[in-house]
C-alpha cells in the first residue's frame, strides 16, 4: 500500500533500486577487477541480472517484462555503470532490439519472442554498423533477398554487442537494392537467430571489457519472412532510429554513472592522500577539480532525467535524448580525465578503478550515435521546433 508521502510507483521504484544496489555490492563490485582484467564474459552475473528481471526491464508486463518507465530504467543504468559499465551493455543492446519488436513487430512475433527475451533466456542485440559505415547507416550493404518464404542474408556487420554470447540480433539490411528516392527506403530490420547460421567473432577493445562485441558474418543465412520486423519492408531505418532514443538515454545514464564514480572516488582519495603536510583536498586546484566534477554529474543527471521523462510521455524526444547523451558522456570523459590527474600515479594503476573509467568513457562518446552526430540532431531539432 502506498504510504501517505509516496505513490505506489515511487515505492515500487525504491524497492527495485534497493534490490539493484544489493546485487551490485554483493555480486558485482568484489569481482569487477578480476573479470575486467581477464576480459571474461560475466556469465554468472548475467544470470543474476536475468533473475532480477533486467532483460525485461522495459518490456511491457503483457509479454513478461517489468514494464519499467525510462526514468526508473535510467536510474538502474546509472547505478550499474557506476560499478561496472560493461554490464549495462549486456542488457541495453538487448532492450533496444526488444523495443523494436514490441513497437513494430506483429502480435505473433511479440508472443513468440518477447517472453523469452524478458526472461533473459534468449539474449541479443542490434547489428547496424558495418566495416564501411556506422554514422551513415543508409550506406549499409548487407542485403536480404527474398527466396520463397525466406530472406537470404549476405554481408558483414561490425561492432555488434552481444553477438558472440547472445542468441539473436536485429539486423539492418537492404531488402530493395533498386529502391528509388531516399536511400533508407530499401532498408528493413530482420530478427535473426544465431541458429539460423550467422558467425560472430569477438573484437578486442580498449575498454568495455567482459561484454562481447563482435564482427558478424552472414553467408547465405536463411531467415523466415515472418522475421521481418513490421508489416512491410522499407521501414527498418526509422524503426531502429526510434529505438535509439531509449538507447541514447541509456548511454547518458551510463555517462552519469561513470562521471559519479570518478567523483566519489576522487572525494575519498583527496581526503586521504597528503602532500606538503595536508590532504590534497585542501589544495585549491584540487578543490576546483572536485567542484567542477560534481557540477558535471548533477547537470548530466538532470538532463538525463528530463530526457527519460520526455520519453515516458510517448512523444518524440530526440532533442532531449541528444542533449542528455552529449552532456553526460562528455561529463564522463572529463571526470575520468580529472580523476586520473587527481589520483596521480595511482590513477594509472589497475589497483584503482580510475584507469578503467578512463578506458570506458570514450566509448560513450562514440556509441548510439557519436557526439558529433548528437550536435547535428540537436541543432536540427531546434530549427524544426522553432520555425520562423
Ligand atoms: C565497443 C563498441 C560497441 C558497439 N556496439 C554496437 C552495436 O551493438 N551495434 C551496432 O550496430 N554498432 C555498435 N557499435 C558501433 C558504433 O555505433 C559506431 O562505431 C558509431 O556509430 C560510429 O560509426 P563509425 O565507427 O563507422 O564511425 P564513422 O561513421 O566513420 O565516423 C568517423 C568520424 O566522423 C564523424 N562524422 C561522421 N559523419 C559526420 C557528419 N555528418 N558530420 C560530422 N561528423 C561526422 C563521426 O562523429 C566520427 O567522429 C559499437 C562500437 C563500439 C566501439
Image: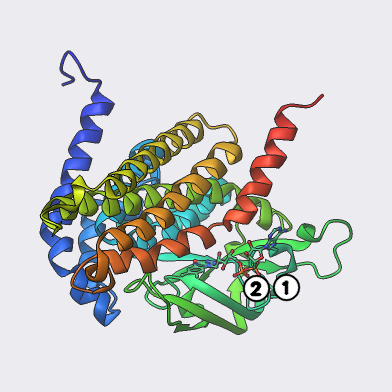
Q: Are the residues flagged by discs 2 and 1 in contact, CB closer than 8 Å?
A: yes
Judge by depth and name the residue closer to the eye, 4 or 81.
81
Residue 283 x/y as whole percent: 23, 48
From the Cβ of disc 1, is ligand 1 less than 8 Å away?
no
Helix or strand or loop: what does disc 1 sit on? strand
Res 205 visible: yes
**Residue name at image x 45 percent, y 82 percent:** 203
**Rendered-image quadrant of the N terminus:** top left
> Within the displayed image, which quadrant is ligand 1 positioned in?
bottom right
Q: Nearer the viewer, residue 72 or 281?
A: 281
Relative depth, front residue between 271 and 9: 271
The image shows residue 291 at horizontal and vertical percentages of: 32, 41
Apparent side of residue 73 relative to residue 347 in the rendered image (left or right): right
Q: Looking at the image, is 48 positioned above or below residue 8?
A: below
Picture coordinates of residue 378, whole percent (x, y):
64, 41
> In percent of the image, x 80 and y 61: which residue is there?
183
Is 40 left, or right, of 147 in this rendering? left
Where residue 87 sits in the image (x, y, percent)? Answer: 31, 62
Question: Is residue 116 something that shows in the picture?
Answer: no
Q: How is the image coloured?
A: rainbow
Q: Which residue is mark 1?
A: 146
The residue that mark 2 highlights is 150
Left or right of 20? Residue 311 is: right
Residue at x 53% of width, y 48% of height = 326
Task: Tell me the CA gap for discs 2 and 1.
Answer: 6 Å
Instruction: Bin the neighbour count of mark 1 within 10 Å (Cα to Cα): few under 14, some 14-19, many 20 and up.
Output: some
Per the image, label 2 sits on a secondary structure element best described as strand
Amino acid at each position: 500500500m502506498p504510504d501517505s508521502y509516496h505513490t505506489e510507483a515511487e515505492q515500487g521504484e525504491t524497492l527495485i533500486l534497493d534490490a539493484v544496489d544489493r546485487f551490485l555490492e554483493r555480486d558485482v563490485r568484489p569481482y569487477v577487477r578480476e573479470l575486467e582484467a581477464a576480459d571474461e564474459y560475466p556469465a554468472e552475473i548475467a544470470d543474476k541480472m536475468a533473475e532480477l528481471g533486467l532483460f525485461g526491464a522495459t518490456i511491457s508486463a503483457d509479454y513478461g517484462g517489468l514494464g519499467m518507465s525510462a526514468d526508473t530504467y535510467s536510474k538502474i543504468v546509472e547505478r550499474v555503470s557506476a560499478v561496472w559499465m560493461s554490464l549495462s551493455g549486456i542488457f541495453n543492446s538487448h532492450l533496444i532490439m526488444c523495443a523494436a519488436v514490441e513497437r513494430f513487430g506483429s502480435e505473433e512475433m511479440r508472443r513468440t519472442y518477447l517472453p523469452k527475451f524478458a526472461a533473459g533466456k534468449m539474449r541479443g542485440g542490434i547489428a547496424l554498423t558495418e566495416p564501411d559505415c556506422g554514422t551513415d547507416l543508409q550506406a549499409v550493404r548487407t542485403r536480404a533477398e527474398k527466396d520463397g518464404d525466406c530472406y537470404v542474408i549476405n554481408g558483414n556487420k561490425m561492432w555488434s554487442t552481444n553477438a558472440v554470447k547472445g542468441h539473436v540480433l536485429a539486423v539492418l539490411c537492404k531488402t530493395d537494392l533498386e529502391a528509388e528516392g531516399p536511400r533508407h527506403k530499401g532498408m528493413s530490420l530482420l530478427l535473426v537467430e544465431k541458429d539460423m547460421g550467422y558467425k560472430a567473432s569477438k573484437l578486442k577493445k580498449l575498454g568495455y571489457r567482459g561484454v562481447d562485441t563482435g564482427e558478424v558474418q552472414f553467408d547465405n543465412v536463411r531467415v523466415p519472412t515472418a522475421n521481418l520486423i513490421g508489416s512491410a519492408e522499407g521501414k527498418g531505418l526509422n524503426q531502429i532510429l526510434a529505438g535509439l532514443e531509449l538507447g541514447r538515454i541509456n548511454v547518458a545514464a551510463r555517462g552519469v554513472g561513470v562521471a559519479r564514480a570518478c567523483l566519489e572516488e576522487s572525494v575519498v582519495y583527496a581526503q586521504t592522500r597528503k602532500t606538503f603536510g595536508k590532504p590534497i583536498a585542501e589544495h585549491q586546484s584540487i578543490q576546483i577539480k572536485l567542484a567542477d566534477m560534481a557540477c558535471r554529474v548533477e547537470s548530466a543527471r538532470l538532463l538525463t532525467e528530463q530526457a527519460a521523462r520526455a520519453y515516458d510521455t510517448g512523444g518524440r524526444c530526440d532533442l532531449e535524448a541528444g542533449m542528455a547523451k552529449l552532456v553526460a558522456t562528455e561529463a564522463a570523459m572529463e571526470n575520468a580525465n580529472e580523476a586520473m590527474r587527481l589520483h596521480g600515479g595511482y590513477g594509472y594503476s589497475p589497483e584503482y578503478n580510475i584507469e578503467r573509467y578512463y578506458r570506458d568513457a570514450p566509448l560513450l562518446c562514440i556509441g548510439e550515435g557519436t557526439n558529433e552526430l548528437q550536435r547535428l540532431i540537436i541543432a536540427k531539432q531546434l530549427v524544426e521546433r522553432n520555425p520562423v
